[in-house]
Amino acid sequence: MKSKIGLIIGREYFERVSKKSFIITTILMPVLMLLLMAAPALIMMFASPDSKVVYVEDRSGLVAPRLTSDEEVTFKTASLPVDTLVAHGDFDAIVLIPDSVVSGRSVIQLYSNGPSSMSLESNISRQINDIVETERLKQYNIENLDEILKEVQSDVTINTVRTDREGDDSTASAGVSYGVGMVLTFILYMFLLLYGQMVMNGIIEEKNNRVLEVVVSSVKPTQLMMGKILGIGLVAVTQILLWCVLMTALAAFLFPVIMPAEAMNEVSQLQAGTLDMSLYSGDELAAIQGVSLLGNVGFILKIFGWMTLFLIGGFLFYATMYAAIGASVDNVQDAGQLSFIVVMPVLIGLIVSTMAAADPNTSLAFWLSIVPFTSPMVMMSRIPSGIPEWEIIVSAVVLFLSFLGMVWVAAKIYRVGIFMHGKKPNIKDLAKWIKYK
Amino acid sequence: MNLLTANNITKAYAGGNIALDDVSIEVPKGSVYGLLGPNGAGKTTLIRIINHITAPDKGTVTFDGHPLTQADVEHIGYLPEERGLYKKMKVGEQAIFFARLKGLSKADATRQLKEWFDKFGISDWWNKKVEELSKGMAQKVQFIVTVLHRPKLLIFDEPFSGFDPINANLLKEEILGLRDNGSTVIFSSHNMSSVEEICDDITLINKGHNILSGNVNDIRERFGKGRYTIDFKGDARALMESVESLAGEFLLSDRDKELKQLQLRLNPGVRLHDLISAANDATELRGFNVSKASLNEIFIHTVESNEKNR
């Protein structure tokens, strides 16, 4: 009997793995994802935005000389009257600074040729505010003002180090955990729905072209159902493994190319504990931490280990529900209503995940990461922030036990459903089939 | 000796719909057994129970001398009425898959399949996908898949539907050949002439009840008993009036332009001689025969009188 399940698994597996569409998506997906990750860098390299020309008419005479041009803006002193410049039209914006800019409250006019951009406005207002602030301080005639100002300038950075037993030596800041958690949750979500529906569609197809009746004259309906679920599950595992291998290979090849050598140096300093953190701003430090974390083999292996566990558990659980639904309908259109039972909790899980990734310790996040209907997603979003391991283990055990329970329910529905044609069943009917001997 | 016996099978579906009510059949080893009945009579349910796909609520099935188990399905071949193969799979690959599900090794399956494909002249289909085949072609493949593992019991549900007369005949020869080689065949059909030709015994099921069982010839004789056909020229009305007191169940038909035929049943206690002389007096008598009931008539008659009696 065992070997018959093996035959079914083999058929499901090889039919799908040998499909052109499977091979293409398996190869193209990592390339696409890396391109997506590299896209911002590439865009910056090739398409830096045109610098905007801003004329400054400074009636106070204090501000204009100290405005600094950068990639985004080039400041020019207005040599002509504003009206003439406007008529001429050869500019992006004109800033009109009144006499009273330092002495009192005043409004600065910005004449924009075409739509003004928010980043331009904030750039100009930030610079002018800084200058005005300094000028006002100067009026107090404080000695060594420049040195004092330099000293008081603040740029606080938080470097999180876990002190409880659960925290390991990796210094995962909340921001990085959030990012990793969300990415993992989303991948999980996609896989569960995609491959779950593949199980459903496969069963509907078998039922529709009546091959099912031939198969169940050789194996038990439950064996056929489990064979299908396991076979497609193997396809999912194969795809993930291939993606991991391809991504690692591509990343190993591309990472040093994209990352400047200086950054890699900083990362290795952080890992060695010799990095002088006071030299870096908060954003820079977070980036270094992120890169360091992704390069931390222990962390990655642990995360992927849990990921695989919840992926398999979640897939089995949801695919079994999808199998029951597939068996009870005649076509994919009819399945829409019933598959709501599956999609709904998955969506709730996804939504709660975004909250759980931001704050993994709320009781909502905790309980929904234990309840099997939402646990794969919610737990996955909590794991990167380093929650106690027993929580993960309890969640996994509950998930796998629920899978077994779901198999029992689904097998009952399946057995009856596969021979029902024509009538579109509702949830009530399904409940009746479960009770039916 | 019976290869298969089903004893007092009862099966009800959810919602109280009774598919089979106390049905028993006995299928002798090496025979062709006809399972007849109108649509929705419960034939498919009975076949599924024999195939160990569903379990009966009450009753037992004995196969080859022991209670039927899941392991026995390796000795059963089933061709369902609604044919189905995996469309995207190649013909050869698929046939091997089904053969292995029935317990054959890959090597055995491949060797025997090649033989069958040669016999049916379809060897060049081996690497085609099923979706590229016509309906009739797919039927042939499915037939081979059904019989390949040399099952002790073969179950054919409407095997001839979708076959042209030539291929239907080829199939009939194969089925009889399989029986001659020791297989037992259960044959479910609405096509009574084919049942008449190849079945040894039949069971007629209507609305979940077994309403008629037995050897085909015995049944035809039993139903034909007391029925005669009179070929005559002349006034049909006069003939019917003159024999009205002697016989009933008249069935009048035209043989050709002049010749007519009347079928009737002799009333109990009436001598055949009286009927013939009465008929001879009323018309110009051209022929007189003992009629044998066709299964078709038996089917319709039995089902209809069964409906009336409920």
Image: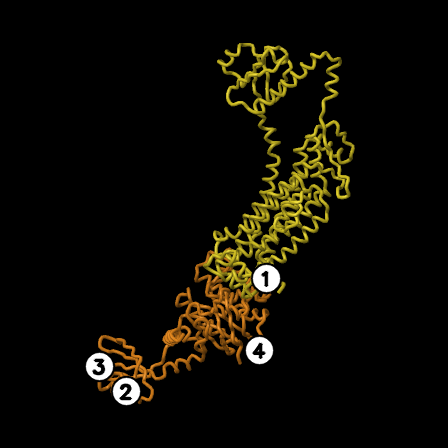
Chain colours: A yellow, B orange
- In 3D space, how far apart are the residues under numbered discs 2 and 3 (Cα atoms)? 14 Å
Q: Nearer the viewer, residue A431 or B259?
A: A431
The answer to whether residue B182 is seen in the rendering is: no
Q: Amino acid at mark 4?
A: Gly
Q: Is residue A65 above or below residue A184?
A: above
The reply to whether discs 1 and 4 touch (Cβ–Cβ < 8 Å) is no
Quarter of the rendering containing residue A290: top right
Question: Which residue in the protein does label 4 denote?
Answer: B65
Secondary structure of the residue carrying numbered label 1? helix
Q: Earlier in the sequence, mark 2 or mark 3?
A: 3
Question: Which residue in the protein does label 1 denote?
Answer: A223
* Chain under numbered label 3: B
How busy is the neighbourhood of tag 2: few (under 14 within 10 Å), some, or many (20 plus)? some
Tell me how many marks there are: 4
Question: Which residue in the protein does label 3 denote?
Answer: B238
- The percent coordinates of residue A373 (x first, y second) are 61, 50
Q: Residue at x 30, y 81 (%)?
A: B248
The reply to whether discs 3 and 4 touch (Cβ–Cβ < 8 Å) is no
How busy is the neighbourhood of tag 1: few (under 14 within 10 Å), some, or many (20 plus)? some
Question: Which residue in the protein does label 2 denote?
Answer: B275
Q: Amino acid at mark 2?
A: Leu
- On screen, residue A64 versus residue A433, left or right, reads right
Marks 1 and 3 belong to one chain: no
Q: Please tell me whether mark 1 or mark 3 is closer to you in this view.
A: 3
Quarter of the rendering containing residue B73: bottom right
Q: Amino acid at mark 1?
A: Gln
Q: Amino acid at mark 3?
A: Ala
